[in-house]
Image (cartoon, helix red, strand yellow):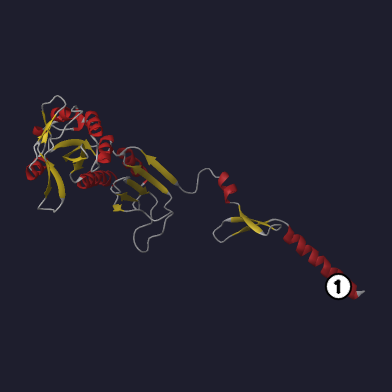
Amino acid sequence: MEHEDERRGDAAAIIDEVRRHAEPRIMQAQDGTSFLILPDSLTAESLKRFEDERRSHPERRRGTATLTTLQSFADHVSRFADEHSAVFANDDRSSPELLAVLDYHQRGAEGLPQFGEHRSLYRFPLSDEWKAWNALANKQLDQATLANHLEDHLDDVLSPDSVGDTVREFAERHGIALAGPVRLQELARGLSVRVDRKVTNLQNPSTGEARIHFEETHAGEDGGELKVPGGFALGIPVFRGGDLYQVPVRLRYRVSKGAILWSTALHRTDRVFDHAFEQACRLVEEATGLPIYQGRPERS
């Protein structure tokens, strides 16, 4: 009987233990996070999302606000930034942007790491003028394409007497007489330009580059003469709503199978872009008092 009682006691203890482990339990980790232990699937499910629903406010800020003007970006950053916030500048000329990490890591080697999940983003909108002229730059254009483009963008062309010293020096250095809007309009309206058949292949001694050269005087559709200018100057913004920049343009052409092919070469637009981008970064730096790093932040 004694052994039978012991066996019954052991069986009851086993049943109690199985029953205890078969019921769902709530356990807490060291950081205070609660978990629901589900014995059927032998899994632990966090209760944080249920706890968050009962909070009066979130534990921390997170998410990225996308701003559409530089001023709004600076204002948004100033509203939430602290002494550890930082701005990162991506100077990709096709898609420039500024990204502020508002909850960035604390300064110094001993500074505490932060989540980096609260951010402000500003994607610079390139101006329509900047995109239009750069889209055709250094491409071979037929007469109709060039004519239509000049007709549509004559407002971007500066009068030769209004250009600054940099453009004037460029024209003098390359021996170019800059054309104004009126002269370019005359060129654009020359729907049929017949080139004199006397063409020669010349070698440029400074670069060794082969090019086709023909006389500067061509016959227009009315039988008269039409001069082809060597270049002109643009006054266009890099970013939408931004300051105007003067950009010299060389107008080139060559004969191919009896037709004229044109190309426009915009001078050092990389420097123009860099200057406009640096000016924008300086404005944000002054408005927010935050450091600006060239590049991208760590992944959040």
Name the spot of residue 213 as percent of width and height, x first. Answer: 12, 43
In this view, the residue farthest toward the top is 222
Q: Quadrant of the C terminus?
A: bottom left
Residue furthest to the right in view is 1
Q: Residue furthest bottom?
A: 3
Disc 1 secondary structure class: helix
Tag count in the figure? 1
**80 above or below 112?**
above
Q: Position of residue 249 (x, y in %)?
A: 17, 40
Q: Residue at x 22, y 40 (%)?
A: 257
Q: Is residue 184 left or right of residue 101?
A: left
Q: Is residue 266 left or right of residue 82?
A: left
Looking at the rendering, which quadrant does residue 45 occupy?
Answer: bottom right
Check the image and report above or below for 219 versus 31: above
- For label 1, count other residues whose C-alpha is less than 10 Å away and answer few (under 14), some (14-19) or many (20+): few
Q: Could you tell me the amino acid type at mark 1? A: Glu
Q: Give the camera-side residue of 230 and 43.
A: 230
- Residue at image position (35%, 48%) is 100
Residue at the disc numbered 1:
6
Image coordinates of residue 1 in percent, x first then y, are: 93, 74
Q: Quadrant of residue 188?
A: top left
Does the rendering let one see residue 243? no
Q: Position of residue 81 (x, y in %)?
A: 36, 47
Front residue of 99 and 76: 99
Q: Residue at 30% x, 38% y: name it.
A: 71
The residue nearer to you, when weighing 145 against 7, is: 145
Whether residue 18 can be seen here: yes
> 156 above or below 98?
above
Q: Nearer the viewer, residue 56 or 145?
A: 145
